[in-house]
Amino acid sequence: MSTREVSAVCTYWDPSGCEGTVGCPPRCPRAIDDRGVPFLVRPYRSTDFEALVELYEGLDESASTMGLPPFTRPRIEAWLDELTSIGWNLIASLDDRIVGHVAVTPADEPDPEFVVFVDTDAQNRGIGSELLRQLIAYADDRDHEALSLDVSTENRHAVTVYENVGFETIERSQLNRTMRLPLDDPIADRVRRPPAERLE
């Protein structure tokens, strides 16, 4: 079978047997969602800006938590300009369309904060959970000491996702809670293992 025929038949590369190489990123960028559809997580590039704006323009208001993301194009652009200039960012793409984004700021803090959002049509498929695992792997690789975020107390789904990954509530008010994950937690090592060594 020729290379052309193979690529016409093969819809994706199965990363499950990968043992990693010296040049691998902190976590394998290839993943499979809960429906069996492959997607990719990689560092943000400046050429992603317009597609990222479109992701946020397409979110419905129920995705908003604690006033984020903003909902007008000029405010989304200003917010993303700030996130991409003072922090580091990862995006999830599915069929060449950005469906998820995680931003970590400030990039030089030992204990930075982060935000994560997933396209409404791509939610409940494991993409957000994979973005969190990627976040932890990249943060550990960058020698951060911990990760933290503020989340609305009413957003039980998000709180549960964060708790399942290992985040703990360190402060709680009536409206929100602050959650934190120290990167000396065993999860930081687990998420960096090559796919063939994982039990996720």
Image (cartoon, rainbow, N blue to C red):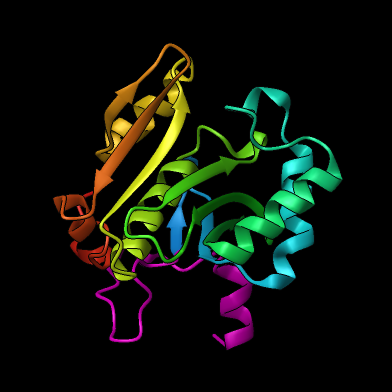
Give the mark count: 0
| Above/below status of 198 relative to 118 | below
- Residue extending farthest top: 174
Left or right: 162 with respect to 29?
left
- Report whether residue 94 is seen: no
Asked if the magenta segment contains residue 21, the reply would be: yes
- Depth check: 79 or 56 in front? 79
**Relative to 124, does residue 186 appear above or below in the rendering?**
below
- Please say if 168 is above or below 19: above
Q: Is residue 159 left or right of residue 96?
A: left
**Residue at point 37%, 66% (across, down):** 15
Task: State the extent of the magenta-drawn residues as a range.
Answer: 1-29
For the stretch drawn in magenta, what is the main secondary structure?
Answer: loop
Q: Residue at x 32, y 59 (%)?
A: 110
- In the shown orientation, is residue 11 left or right of residue 77? left
Residue 158 falls inside the magenta stretch: no
